[in-house]
Image (cartoon, rainbow, N blue to C red):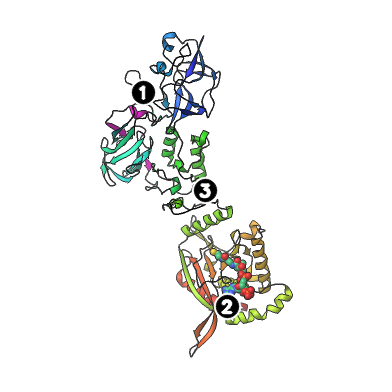
Amino acid sequence: MSEQEIRVPDLGGADEVEVIEILVNAGDSVAEEDPILTVETDKASVELPSPSAGKIVNIIVKVGDKIKEGDVVGTLSSDSVDSSDSAGSAGSSDGASDGASNRSSAPEPKAQSDDAPAKPDDSTGKPAPQKKSGGTRTEIVKVSGLDGFDDIPIIELNVSEGDDVDVESALVTVESDKATMEIPSPLAGKIGKILVKEGDKISEGDDLLEMIITDDGADDGDDADDSAPADSIDAGNNSPAEPEPSAAPLAAPEQPAAASDNKAKPADTGSATYEVPAAGSKVHAGPAVRKLARELGVDLARVKGSGPKSRIIKDDVHGYVKAQLQQAQQGAVVPGAGTSGIPGVKLPDFSQFGEVEREGMSRMMSVTALNMHRSWLNVPHVTQFEDADISDMEDFRKSLKALGEKKGVKMTPLPFMLKACAAALAELPQFNVALDMDRKEVVHKKYIHIGIAVDTPHGLMVPVIRNVDQKGLWELAAESAELASKARDKKLKPAEMQGACFTITSLGGIGGTAFTPIVNTPEVAILGVSKAAMKPVWDGTAFQPRLMLPLSLSYDHRAVNGADAARFTSALARLMGDIRTLLL
Ligand code: COA
């Protein structure tokens, strides 16, 4: 039995690397080349292999330590380590060998990959040494890995000249009549001249682009293909992209600027996500994880890493996909994430224009944003406008002031609107429905519950008044005031915000002449009310000054046709124009 030190082998020129994962424990048996540690340079993660077979005695470094070539990281005991094997290896017995003496036979670090293996050295079958010379060189990256497809049109260039790319970053997206696929980069470097353009048809072996490689030796531990011939590299050979079903979105949604790093943007699965990385953040993930992400159509820039230094591991990718599926099944949409095939909004770096400050959204704001976005995307909206003459209604309302003070209830125009809407919903029941598009059914509601939008300091809330048709004006006045006050004090219970058939959003107390409210789906219509104003109205012989209330009815054009919308607003104008008709 002999013991040998485990030393850091040739790192291909990287000065110092950080230990991000320890893959073995004392007592573990390892085979030669089994990974012992994962280290990370600023460009890649690399597994350091065991110099020979044996049992781990100890590991003397910990996650976060910085190590360099020649450093001792642990001890290995072995029955079979013979002196010739170990003479020049990481475990030379004098323990004082310098890194240079070890280099000749120390195992090479290998890229952390199960899909991007280092190109074997012809003679040994072991990973070939990485280049260590300084300076830059230019490689022609060729098309490869097209899985038998030929003459396939490029539908998207995923990179631009000057972009820095990692191994496996998508370079171009091609589309056959059966599938779309990305051609990944076989190595890390800077994109030079791009030799193809969108629409070009490419086949195996065609020149794709020039890649400028900086031979600082640390350009990418993932990139075992550094050992490829100096004048050409096959794109796609490294780990061919799996064809995605053609149903997958062809154009990857834009990422927010904060997430952009000029790296390839794999196709997004569509709806949802919402780990938007901080500005300038870099994705830390090994090639196997990148491959998995590409297979699943996951944009790693959106995945939160749970590994050391926020490194993304396979479980994170699976967790992300699960969360997306759950959200999609719940019908969630997320602003800015690129939903329904619509590209997301790309934010500029606002700080280039002046000072900015970022603040997290409150839960209420993000929930409201989601609901608005969902309604806006799902509902084909049309808005119908009308003016109701409420001169007589206002006279009557004002006449109730003294009685209201006695009752302790303020009579505003809102209860009249509630009554008018309830009557119009009864008259035109096609507004009191929900659409079940999955089952191709219309749900007719036999009750009349109306939501009222309430402006509160913490956001918009919509409490619901039940059975409006069965309540009188005073009851409605008291209940709406109570619900509005509860909303402002954050005292509303969830049940008090559910079950509406229709919503009234009144900005009349604030101002404005008209607006286009967003339907609170699954309701099919919403009434926007603006500020009443005196207007000259022609009575057939002369203009009369009348108090006119602007109404804006937005409706879901799948459920309601335009003629019915005009009937609805006309009915409201009639009912509020002569409130005696509310009694009929
Ligand atoms: N035209 C002119 N004046 C109006 C009016 C209208 N359409 N609607 C209300 N007013 C008057 C009221 O009569 C009252 O005046 P007064 O004190 O002289 O009697 C004043 O405006 C304030 O009324 P308000 O306290 O707002 O009561 P309300 O019953 O009309 O409205 C709410 C209650 C909850 C709807 C209202 O307070 C509110 O929050 N509105 C905002 C809703 C919103 O933000 N919608 C946007 C959704 S995107």
Residue 340, image x, y percentages: 44, 53
Q: Which residue is mark 2?
A: 576
Question: Image quarter for residue 235?
Answer: top left
Count neighbours of disc 3 (C-alpha within 10 A) and say few if under 14, some if 14 to 19, many if 20 or more: some
- Magenta region: 222-247
Count neighbours of disc 2 (C-alpha within 10 A) and say few if under 14, some if 14 to 19, many if 20 or more: many
Mark linked to residue 327? 3
SS for callout 2 = helix
Count neighbours of disc 1 (C-alpha within 10 A) and say few if under 14, some if 14 to 19, many if 20 or more: many
- Observer-nearest residue: 39 or 271? 39
Which amino acid, mark 1? Answer: Pro
The C terminus, quarter of image: bottom right
Looking at the image, can residue 502 be seen?
no
Mark 3 / mark 1, whichever is N-terminal: 1
| Residue at point 68%, 65% (across, down) | 482
Mark 3 / mark 2, whichever is N-terminal: 3
| Residue at point 51%, 28% (across, down) | 21
Whether disc 3's CB lies below 8 Å from ligand 1 is answered: no
